[in-house]
Image (cartoon, rainbow, N blue to C red):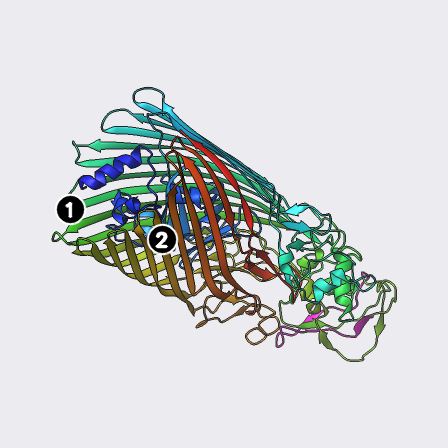
Amino acid sequence: MNSSLNAFATRLLTGVALGAVAVSGAAAQSDEIVVTATKRPQTLQEVPIAVSVVGAETIQKAQINDLIDLQTVVPSLRVTQLQNSSQTNFTIRGFGNGANNPGIESSVGVFIDGVYRSRSAAAILDLPTLERVEVLRGPQSTLFGKNVSAGAISITTKLPTFDWSGNVEASYGNYDQMLFKGTLSGPISDNVAFRVSGSANKRDGYYTNIVDGTDQNERNRWALRGQLLWEASDALTFRVIGDYNKLDENCCGAVTILNGPATQVIAAPPPFGLGEEISDGTDPFSRNVAVDTETNNKLTGKGVSLQADWELGDGFAQLTSITAYREQSDTANTDVDFSGADLAQNPQDRKYETFTQEIRLSSVGDNRFDWMVGAFYFNEDVFLQRDVIFGAQERANIDLLLQASGSSILEFEGASQVAYALTTDPMTAVFPTLGPIQPVPFGASFTPGTGVFGTYNMDNESYSFFGQADFEITDRLTISGGISYIDDSKSATGISNLTDYVSLFDVTAGGQSFVAATVLGGMIPGAFGGPVAFDPADPAAFITPALTWAFVDPVGFATAQQTALGTAAVAPNPLAAFGSIQFFAPQTNFPDPSNPFDNGKLDSNDVTWTARLAYDVTDNFNAYFTYATGYKAGAFNLSSDSRPPVDASGLGRVASPEDVRLFELGFKANFDGGYVNIALFDQKIEGFQSNVFNGIGFDLANAGEQTSRGFEIESLYSPWNPLSLTFALTYLDPEYKSFTMAGCTPFDTVNCSMGERFRDLSGTRVPGVHEVSLSTSATYNFDVNDNWGGYARVEYLYESDVALIENIPSSITREVNVLNASIGFETQDGFEVMVWGRNLTDDEYFLQGFPTVAQTGSVSGYTNAPRTYGVTVRKSF
């Protein structure tokens, strides 16, 4: 390690911030920005990895309060908060998933002070007292283990200091936002120091519920964090960190983008509809939503970690151990019909207990041969209670929908009783065409309080061994190689209790045929004459000695009479017509002893590796070439959408692991007053885990092969000392090379015929991934007098127009043009006042869209935050 890097590493360890996007010419050199992307300190210029770094100074002056705000300065990163605060999705270079199901982990790993945060909700609360945030692009599995197949976000917080220091700040903004932050650090003894930090963030919602006038999408969260640093000797240090955070918010509203016929029935006046409020699809950015029940999200996270660093052999090597234990629990209740009608709600209760242990041994000093070896262990228990419960108006809503086809829910109930009476074994109620059935009492379908009630558990154990070496072949040419063995085992259980009668029938099994029968009794539950004979030549039909049935009661359809046909007959399956109102398919609990492919276990392992050449063309210009592989563990679909697998692929219940391959060519140039870094890449994921909402539930499937080719440019230039300019550009060309199991949608009438569940999207562009993303900023520092100084900052984010997602009309798109700015004044003794604004032009765009739940033809979505502005007062000492 050279002397310059030693100096800056020392400054890091004493908590002095190094802004990655610096605000003065003196700090504009990339060889002054220290990163730990390779788990050893290197400058941004010399590290041969595509990495973006955001420092504490930029985070303060850009009013970046959480990782959602961070994406405005890192164009390759996208962070989207969806149904609630624990459903936040991270993507890098267009790759990423894992937001909507506890059994599906993210493709982007988040690490805070070296501790892996396995769940996105554990990473989105207000950022603690920061040193820097590094965004590593491309697979990082060799050094960071599983679930970093798209990249990693590494957050480093400030260490305790042995001199008294601290700061307090308060912000007030529109929507009645009140934000408080503070930190205090100092010595306990000559070799023990502490730091305590806290924050509270409260804000009114920017959505309005037109049913009762309340706000949605509010902020109400707080966090505490404490640290102890013990320098036991010159060679041995310990760092203990404990944190606790809570969130209690009314989140997250979804607006209507397109109102189809089913949604219009909700709004139509009686007797043509329910006469309830719906969101106006003609003006989604009015941010008016309609919900009839409180949509709350409560989350508690807490954890403790211990890091030990021991220098061995008088500077020969350093041994590092990071041990951590975390707990997270969150509850949420969502009005899933997104209307003022009492149709259905979705309460969820999730709990996670996570233990991690990393140990690594690495060389230190300025060596021709640098090396690192290590191991990582991960153990997590996941619990999920997920219910969907029908409300008081669901039955009336279903009947209104069926009236359009001249049918009635009473017909379904009657048909179910006919089918039950015709079972081959009435004692077990197994009908070869329809599967296990039972008669539905009249009036029992879609009753309030019925639905699906699911309890799911998953145990996940994983370990990896890794090593990496860098060898300087010459003073300018370095060859690097790394390898990792990763083993991941999951065992899961799922128990789904269906109390909704309609969901008990497999209405599509055995085709579209149903038996004709003779009704001898007056009431439908009565006895039926003659045995039912099965014709093996036609498994979809049943031959009876007689006649057909028909409902004749004009009031209740509760009686039947026989109509003589004289010959045996086969009639269409009347239950098949009711597939459109079956929200949940018949459930199969797992593990299922009768199905060898449904044993509730998912075991996988992989060897990932990295090879890299780095060449210093001059002292200020270098190039590198990287070939790397990555791995993401397999996933379970922990929900009532989960289907029993029919073969070894596990399709429907599980998704196989993702395998990643990356070619990357990079150039880094450092010049007086700035730098330019360029990366060209070709990245491929085989078996990408797609989890797309189909209007009723989520379809989990491996996407075959997805590629992303493109380039990235990041630069900083300070033409003179007070002015600093940044520019970052990402170009992406993502494509589904092979995706034959994409979920069907009613909006795709070309590739999806009636009743089909999957379609082929091979050869199409991946939606939701912008072709061009651009971020630029300018910061100007100035002096007011001998005591007062100031700065002005403006930043702009552009993302080109793109279709949101593959299961809604491609005409629904997103284009981003966001302008942020701030101006501040600060004194020599640490007092600062800043006026800031985000999205100053009030740009409007959709974060994501989805088929409205159980309302065919309708589309809902989540909008971005409107213009926000405020003032911040800060005192540092």
- In the displayed structure, 163 sits above or below 271; it is above
In the image, what residue type sits under mark 1?
Phe
Q: Which residue is mark 2?
A: 725
Q: Is residue 623 left or right of residue 764?
A: left
Q: Farthest left residue?
A: 474
User: Residue 668: x percent and y percent?
Assistant: 25, 56
- In percent of the image, x 16 and y 42: which residue is there? 366
Name the quadrant of the N terminus: top left
Mark 2 is surrounded, within 10 Å at the Cα level, by few (under 14), some (14 to 19) or many (20 or more) other residues, namely many
Q: Nearer the viewer, residue 853 or 604?
A: 853
Q: In the picture, residue 695 is in which quadrant? A: bottom right
Mark sitting earlier along the chain (1/2) = 1
Q: Position of residue 394 (x, y in %)?
A: 74, 56
Helix or strand or loop: what does disc 1 sit on?
strand
> At which x and y percent is residue 348?
60, 45
Residue 834, percent from left and from top = 48, 41
The answer to whether residue 162 of the structure is visible from this angle is yes
Q: Is residue 98 above or below residue 580?
A: above
- Quarter occupied by residue 788: top left
Residue 847 is one of the magenta-drawn residues: no
Magenta span: predominant SS is loop
Binning the other alpha carbons within 10 Å of mark 1 as few (below 14), some (14 to 19) or many (20 upward) gives: some
**Extreme bottom residue here?**
566
Look at the image and give the residue range highlighted in magenta: 525-550
Q: Residue furthest top?
A: 189
281 or 482: nearer the eye? 281
Identify residue for label 1: 369
Question: What residue type is disc 2 on?
Answer: Leu
Task: Give the Cα separation between the discs numbered 1 and 2.
Answer: 37 Å
